[in-house]
Image (cartoon, grey):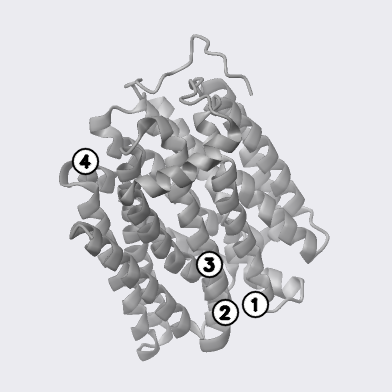
Amino acid sequence: MNTSHPTMTVSPQATRLSTPLIFLLAGGTGLSVASLYYSQPTLGILATELHADGRTIGWIPTLTQFGYALGLLLLAPLGDRFDRRNIILVKAAILCAALLLTGFAPSLGVLLGASLLVGLFATVAQDIVPAAATLAPPAHRGKAVGTVMTGLLLGILLSRVASGFVAEQYGWRTVFVLAAASIALMALVMARGLPRFAPTSNVSYPALLRSLATLWGQHRTLRQAALSQGLLSLGFSAFWSTLAVMLHGAPFHLGAAAAGSFGLAGAVGALAAPFAGRMADRRGAAWVARLAAAISLASFATMFAMPLLPVPGQLVLLALATIGFDLGVQASLISHQTIVYGIAPEARSRLNAILMTSVFVGMATGGLLGAQALAAWGWNGVVLLAVAASTAALLVRTLAAAGK
């Protein structure tokens, strides 16, 4: 990758982030990360068409999340070593190809392999987010990251709405062909609108990877942020990776579009992301992270009351809980990113890689455990898993506040 520094190159000391550029970053992040979630509302359709049971079909979102975690660990640190613009464009091209492979997969085995590749290269989203932190002045870094993360979070949640509707009307393969087209368009706009970024490190790739362990060992705040956010992500993924299957069965008998529509409820919570960033700038990111974990826990716990209600009441409660825990999980993520970006500015890509690796290890684990819990104990098993993970996350933040 080219590491030359032409006129448009920006340094880590840059302090201007224009409105068009921040919207470009937010949009690119949202479209990239959406690739991880298009499959979730379609799992009921996929299970029927591919003659797979719930446990087997649960491997599709699990492998996608695992690929994302692997990509964060192995590819995201390159942002400190090379021009981040070039990395974004190359990964976007490969992501486009992986989505096309998913859409034309002839068998479940190919679909599983393609899902892993989609996750691996959807990490382009996590090359874009540190760009906002690099360009923003320190006093407003939380706001800038929160704005870009709004794009990411809306991509996560609205992707379910779009894929659920398209899959029901035009088939699940169309979902991934359209997704590939959106990434191709994103890459074209990014090629014209992104500045070049000066590398902040000249160490070798093996040394970059070794430095991840060094950063992990040196910074307790990084470990606390990664553990807490990973636990919240486990509960988040357990819910979303099983929702379509649960709604597909009794007593709801709802299709992919209905499952995807719950993304609209989650989007309400995601829209609070910039507010969480501003609160982190004013009140402290650790305080916001602790409050966010408590909100997530309370929201997940309310779903235990679903069996006490008639079916319409259950759906209303489910939507309200979705708003609550999405707000909590996303506010926590903004807060934790604000914390880790302030640790070592020259290593932001690596710090982000560590934090987001924990997030998507949690996502992959939640997808796998959620499918097992649903098969073994029903929806209350999924809710119990999410409540336990959120309780552990709140405990981590509480101990961190006590200096332990």
Q: For label 2, count other residues whose C-alpha is less than 10 Å away and answer few (under 14), some (14-19) or many (20+).
A: some
Q: Nearer the viewer, residue 368 or 331?
A: 368
Of mark 2 and mark 1, the one earlier in the sequence is: 1
Whether residue 28 is visible, yes or no, is: no
Instruction: Identify the image quadrant of the C terminus.
Output: bottom left
Q: Amino acid at mark 2?
A: Gln
Q: Earlier in the sequence, mark 4 or mark 1?
A: 1
Label 3: which secondary element: helix
Q: Nearer the viewer, residue 346 or 237?
A: 346
Mark 1 — residue? 55
Q: CA distance from mark 3 to mark 2?
A: 11 Å
* Local SS, label 1: helix
Q: CA distance from mark 3 to mark 4?
A: 32 Å
Q: Which residue is tagged 4?
A: 281
Find the distance from the CA under tag 4 to the CA under tag 1: 43 Å
Residue 93 percent coordinates (x, y):
68, 35
Which residue is found at the position 59% from the left and 58% from the top? Answer: 66
Whether residue 125 sits left or right of residue 391 in the image: it is right
